[in-house]
Amino acid sequence: MHPHLNIAVSAARAAGRVIMRHFNQVEQLTIKAKSRNDFVTEVDHTAEREIVQVIRRAHPDHAILAEEGGADGHSEFVWIIDPLDGTTNYLHGLPQFAVSIALQHRGKLEHAVIYNPWSQELYTASRGDGAQLDGRRIRVSKARTLEGSLIGTGFPFRQNQNLDSYLPMLRHVMENTAGVRRAGSAALDLAYVAAGRLDGFWEFGLQPWDMAAGILLISEAGGRISDLASDDKDPLKTGNILCGSPKIFEALATALRPLLRSANM
């Protein structure tokens, strides 16, 4: 395992211990609303501090981009961190949440970890070395058509987040696949695409820390990823992502992009 990936794994596990220590004590947590339907707790902050401390001990000169702490430092190495993706699930005792950590070097994603502390499943990837789940190589699904496929998504839950544009897409996918899943943690959804548990995924309005690790995982597992509207745009910059196995990616792009254009997005 590359030393940088080893640091990311150590940091994710440290955060996971914080998260699980408080999992059955949610009623005692201080909860704040960052915006409508977007919550943060002291667990998010404490888990993030654990991650940053592990990274800083090894690389005090590296930059950090974290959900709660924002951007810190200037370096060609940038750690992109979501300490608890799926906070709403966590607050309701729903075990669908994850720690997401990625390392970017000179603008390229190099290492990724997504860790579910409840199930203890650990997804890892390094550029050029493939993607793993608990040390076993994973690949995207072999699905070739939407018929029979299982697609993940994230509902627009913030105000002014293109709900009117999203609903025709949801209807089309529901009518042409085996099912749609909205589990509430984009990081885990992307990990599931990499592992072939989901055949594809799309969502509006994500942040870099929601996607960075998952993007590298899917790429290294043989999948395709782009902005929802265009292959020429970077989802890390637009916040809108489309991904899946190669054939499912193509099928979703063919189906969903005309709906985006008709909505003038």
Image: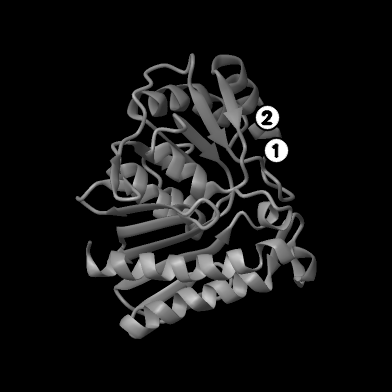
Q: CA distance from mark 1 to mark 2?
A: 6 Å
Horizontal side of 257 relative to 220 (left or right) equals right
User: What's the residue at 57%, 48% (across, down)?
Assistant: 185
| Amino acid type, residue under disc 2 in the picture | Leu
**Quarter assignment of residue 180:** top right
> Which of these two is toward me, 68 or 255?
68
Give the labeled residue for mark 2: 167
Residue 239 appears in view: no
Label 2 residue SS: helix
Q: Quadrant of the C terminus?
A: top right
> Which of these two is toward me, 23 or 126?
23
Percent x, y of residue 251: 43, 22
How are the residues colored? one colour
User: What's the residue at 40%, 45% (across, down)?
Assistant: 233
Percent x, y of residue 134: 35, 50
**Quarter assignment of residue 44:** bottom right
Mark 1 touching mark 2, by CB under 8 A?
Answer: yes
Give the label on residue 163, or none.
1
